[in-house]
Image (cartoon, helix red, strand yellow):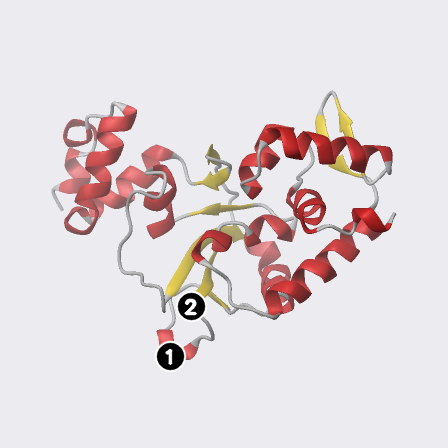
Amino acid sequence: MIELMDTTAAKIVLAIQRGDSINRVANKIGVSYSWVYDWIERLENAEVVANTDNGLRVVDHEMRRQYVEMVAALYRRDTVSQDEAYLVPHFAGLEFVYTEIDAAYVWTHGGYQIARGHDDYPVFIEVHERDVDRWTAFFQRFGIDATVGERPDASDVDGSVHYVLFPKIDGIAIEWVDGDPVIPLDDAVDRMAANRAAYEPALEIIADEYGIDIDASHHSASAD
């Protein structure tokens, strides 16, 4: 059983949400499909996860808890990198979507950044209001700062990567891009068009890739 105490196995188990496919988990953690498939077989044989017709699910929740402790201890020892910033939220076992700046970042496949730097890298996520305390406790366990509702001053947080939580009462609409959950494209474009001066390059990328006539479809938003 000791061979299961592996960081890749831990990331796979922590990233699984009930019903996920192997491909989605692979995309979430940035590991090849074949490598995740191999680990899923081992984890299924050890009765840690189940691979069913309805997708993956974790069946050994004590093992999952052990993986959380192991991975959290590793993250507390060092700073979170920009790439890891989009991995860590998948480990919470809670529903979320990327929003604000990160909606543009995800929909452009990392092609657009604004108002962030290596020394101050907030990540913006929408979460269910009922889960805010669980999210806060999760990030504390990983030694990562998190605030609710607004971006803090860089001097008020430790490290460069930190999280800004936007609680939602009425549910979360999710689309998936490259293994990341994000607000729907129309919603993202509307928000960017409302602040067009800042997001013009992202809108051009999105218009080209997704075949959206942004000037026509979002004229009223961009005219404000």
Q: As drawn, which residue projects farthest toward the top?
A: 53
Tell whether 38 sits left or right of 31.
right
User: Do tag 1 and tag 2 residues touch (Cβ < 8 Å)?
Assistant: no
Q: Earlier in the sequence, mark 1 or mark 2?
A: 1
Circle 1 SS class:
helix
Tell whether 155 sits left or right of 57.
left
Residue at coordinates 14% horizontally, 50% vertically from top-left?
197
Q: Residue 50 location, x and y as percent?
A: 79, 32
User: Which residue carries the number 2 mark?
Assistant: 160
Crowding near pointer 2: few (<14 within 10 Å), some, many (20+)?
many
Can the viewer see residue 20? Answer: no
Q: Residue 82 location, x and y as percent?
A: 43, 56
Residue at coordinates 16% horizontally, 37% vertically from top-left?
220
Residue at coordinates 73% horizontally, 36% vertically from top-left?
39
Q: How many marks?
A: 2
Q: Specify the quadrant of the image occupied by residue 156.
A: bottom left
Crowding near pointer 1: few (<14 within 10 Å), some, many (20+)?
few
Tell whether 145 sits left or right of 151.
right
User: Which residue carries the number 1 mark?
Assistant: 155
Q: Nearer the viewer, mark 1 or mark 2?
A: 2
Q: Residue 41 location, x and y as percent?
A: 77, 30
**Residue 173 badge:** none
Residue at coordinates 58% horizontally, 64% vertically from top-left?
139
Above or below — where is 200 with respect to 26?
A: below
Q: Mark 1: which amino acid? A: Ser
Q: Residue 76 location, x and y as percent?
A: 61, 69
Tell whether 4 sits left or right of 220.
right
Q: Mark 2: which amino acid? A: Ser
Q: Specify the quadrant of the image occupied by residue 221.
A: top left
Can the viewer see residue 45? Answer: yes
Circle 2 SS class:
loop
